[in-house]
């Protein structure tokens, strides 16, 4: 995985976000999970209906953004979790995002939010 810039809390909040229906591969040393993302920005991604990891857990993700070339590999950290009556899921803040991948995500989000 190619590493780019590390994103700060300010970057995450400032990034426009759009609704998506993307499949995301999450890998660890021994496991592979296929999960569904509900929204995306250059700062992070929200994975819905997932049994969440504890906040602070580092994850490796891979996903394809429609119309934006090959799969994107990113490193991230679990920023928030939802587990309860409203459904389960987790917000992942990107910590390692290559500049090209950031541009591709930004182009996609911009095309969706105007």
Image (tube, grey):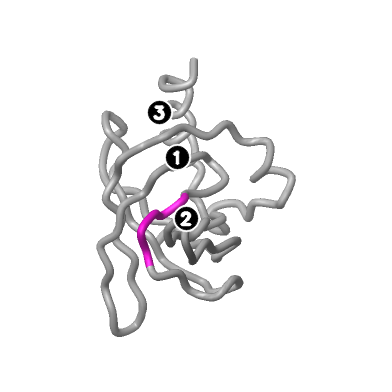
The image shows residue 67 at horizontal and vertical percentages of 27, 29
Q: Residues within 10 Å of mark 2 (few under 14, many from 20)?
A: few
Tell me the SS state at disc 1: helix
Magenta range is 46-50
Q: Quadrant of the N terminus?
A: bottom left
- Who comes first in sequence, dot 2 or dot 1? 2
Q: Which mark is residue 100?
A: 1
The image shows residue 62 at horizontal and vertical percentages of 33, 56
The quarter of the picture where residue 2 lies is: bottom left
> Residue at the location (34% across, 65% down)?
26
Viewer-side residue, 62 vs 37 = 37
**Tags 3 and 1 touching, CB below 8 Å:** no
State left or right for residue 91 relative to residue 105.
Answer: right
The nearer-to-camera label among 3 and 1 is 3
How far separated are the C-alphas under marks 2 and 1? 35 Å
Tell me the SS state at disc 3: helix
How far separated are the C-alphas under marks 3 and 1? 13 Å
Residue farthest toward the top in the current orientation of the protein: 114
> Residue at the location (48% across, 22% down)?
110
* Residue highlighted by disc 2: 86
* Residue highlighted by disc 3: 108
């Amino acid at each position: 995985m190619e590493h780019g810039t590390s994103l700060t809390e300010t970057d995450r909040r400032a990034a426009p976000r759009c609704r998506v229906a993307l499949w995301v591969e999450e890998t660890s040393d021994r496991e592979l999970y296929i999960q569904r993302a509900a929204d995306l920005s250059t700062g992070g991604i929200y994975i819905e209906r997932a049994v969440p990891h504890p906040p602070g857990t580092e994850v490796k993700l891979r996903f394809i953004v429609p119309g934006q070339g090959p799969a994107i590999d990113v490193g991230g950290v679990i920023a928030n979790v939802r587990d309860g009556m409203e459904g389960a899921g987790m917000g992942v803040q990107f910590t390692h995002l290559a500049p090209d991948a950031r541009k591709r995500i930004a182009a996609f989000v911009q095309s969706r939010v105007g």
